[in-house]
Image (tube, coloured by chain):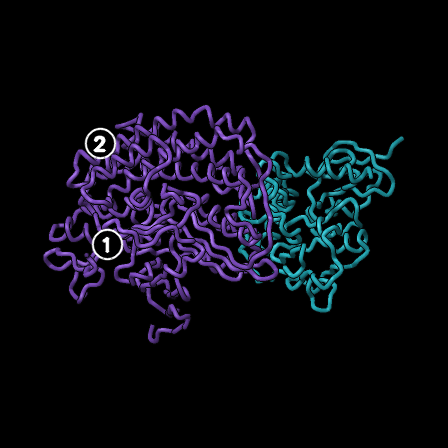
Amino acid sequence: MAKTITIDGVNIPYEEGQTIIEAATTAGIYIPHLCHHPEFTPHGSCKLCTVKVNGRNCSACTFPAMEGQEVINNAKDLNDDRQKITQMLFVEGNHFCPSCEKTGNCQLQAVAYHLNMLDDHFPLFYQHREMDASHADILIDHNRCIFCTLCVRASHAHDGKDVFAISGRGINKHLIVNSESGLLKDTNMAATDKAAHICPTGAILIKHTAYQVPIGERLYDHQQIDQVSLNTELVDHDK
Amino acid sequence: MYEHLETADNTENLKRVVVEPVSRVEGHGKVTLLLDEDNKVKQARLHIVEFRGFERFIQGRPYWELPVLVQRLCGICPVSHHLAAAKAIDQLVGIDPVNLPIAADKLRRLLHFGQVLQSHALHFFHLSSPDLLFGFESEISKRSIIAVIESYPDLAVQGVMLRKYGQEVIRMVSGKRIHGTGAIPGGMNKSLTKEERDYLRKDIEQIISWGVASVALIKKVHCSNLPYYDDFATIRSNYLGLTKPDGALELYHGGIRAKNAQGETIMDHVDYCKYNDFIHEEVRSWTYMKFPYLLSMGQEDGWYRVGPLARVNNCDYIDTPLAELERVDFKAHSNEVMVHSTLAFHWARLIELLHCAESIKTLLNDPDILSQDLVAKGEKRYEGVGVIEAPRGTLFHHYQVDENDIVTKANLIVSTTSNNMAMNESVRQVAAEYLSGQELTEPLLNNLEVAIRAYDPCLSCATHAMGKMPLQLELINADGQLIDKLVKGSNGHINRIANA
């Protein structure tokens, strides 16, 4: 008999070794997340996937599914906290959706819509962050980095290059690249790398491709992130 | 003509009257009058009191963001900024207008005609028609679109529907009614589907007939009180705008033509990329809006007007038949080669609205707008200039980028900026001829706004200060007492005011 956990009162099966978010995705249940990606080792840093497991807050992307777990996911208090976390991500960086080329294809924006985030709530930090446009094909806009480390993990695990790392702590945390000059052009990164395509915001972009997808055909124009996420991540799981 | 009213010789003991904000225009401005004890006007100024800063904060951004970023200058004519920036960044990817794919050129023109149509409809019906239908000094309850809806419901509905149609054209081409995408470096990101084209086609005949009716209405209003309409706020000026190579009216791309008040050519078919060789801008301390002028004529005489009046005055003909008939009528009503009446802006604007409706029909019947051949690319360049005829006049976008595709320098000469001197002259004319010496009442002051409104200014687009933005910071305690005061001058120096 299959092992099961409950999520919001619904029994779902899981396989040994699966995390809660993996079991949920397989069962067609969306748990909001940004730093999680089914292909890479869980990181547990964005905290959007926080769920209550038997009354205790846990990151669904790192916590293993275990027999007897009663998981609360889609609850008002959790969604309120997720909304606050998202608002903090927005005010800590410089996210100007109206002119951002990632708009409509951006996970951060889509998750904000999903969580009904209507304003920033918190005062904006207005941090001064530089752009790195030195690479011929790839642009890094540090204004939009949320330190999810997906590029770090993709470059390491998929591309085998270790182009990216996170340096500094707390508010001084920042994305660095593996070159003496500190510029992307002096790394071995290529536009075909997984790391160049995995950013959930508009921090890492392929140059000269902006706005080529018309409004109406963008990823989140007709579907919310829960549907898109389940569709794409189920495919990734099946690989 | 009325320059002496820009600055009073001695401002002591003069009474100050302020119209703030100027209503039914885009953006924020105010008019100040200084009057002596006999209510004679000694000084009249139109001040633009908001500050934007786009030219500065787009520096450091990648150039492909520009059409989408700078269109946020405006909610009324974003398409014009979008396309002016697009024309400039075409050059950055090595594409001059002649090399733009035909489909992209036609789709951009369609987008632009939709934009000018909706903007002109908005201005005439929503903003100006109350003045023109009820009188300049009518009671305040009559001075809004609500009163037009009550008294002339059919007309108000036509205005709303005309605007809506223009917005729908924009939505079909760029994805959204306001602030869509569409233009990308070297082309467009989509063409029209047959369904989208047919959706627009089904209403175009109605739109054209409403356009014809609109011109008939303004012609009747103007000609029924001809001496007044030809005199009110009227100034004699130079005129500047784009025309086609054969001298026809042009809104999207052409050479620059300028004529003087007598209709003599100052320049013609000039490449707009060289605009800096013949247009300079002057800064005055009392407004955030700059004063452009033709270098060859100097600051005193080189100012010019742009927009519908300039375009219809300047062109040799209009290449759509109904609008051309109206242009001929328009020119014939004046005794002079050039029509100088400021209120004739409205008439010219509606002739252009009709031209846009006719041109949209032509393009909707053109199979090229369904083509998928949408983008071209050439050799990278480091500088691009895009110029377009926005609803309010000639709009200049000029950008420089570095080897990493990042914007290093930007200059925007926004249409309304070119009309700055003219609007001030018209305000001074009205102040001197219609207000001076009278007991000023609120309805009487609306005359000043009517003069400004004729230009359809977009003050929020047009405000670009030179140098550092002057600021004044005051710390006031709960009792209203000034505790501290810092003042930043336009040179950027900050001073603490002692004994504050």
| Direction from residue B226 to residue B81 in the image, left or right | right
Q: Nearer the viewer, residue A199 or B259?
A: B259
- Residue position marked by numbered label 1 in the rendering: B425
SS at mark 2 in the image: helix
Q: Badge 2: how crowded within 10 Å, few (<14), some, or many (20+)?
A: few
In the rendering, which numbered label is found on residue B341?
none
* Percent position of residue B440, x then y: 16, 49
CA–CA distance between discs 2 and 1?
27 Å
Q: Badge 1: how crowded within 10 Å, few (<14), some, or many (20+)?
A: many
Q: Nearer the viewer, residue B313 or A160?
A: B313
The residue type indicated by label 2 comes to Lys
The chain letter for the residue carrying disc 1 is B
Query: Chain in purple?
Result: B
Q: Nearer the viewer, residue B85 or B365?
A: B365
Q: Residue at x 35, y 38 (%)?
A: B120
| Direction from residue B291 to residue B69 in the image, left or right | right
The quadrant of the rendering that contains the C terminus of chain B is: bottom left
Would you say the residues marked 2 and 1 are in contact, meaning their CB atoms lie under 8 Å apart? Answer: no
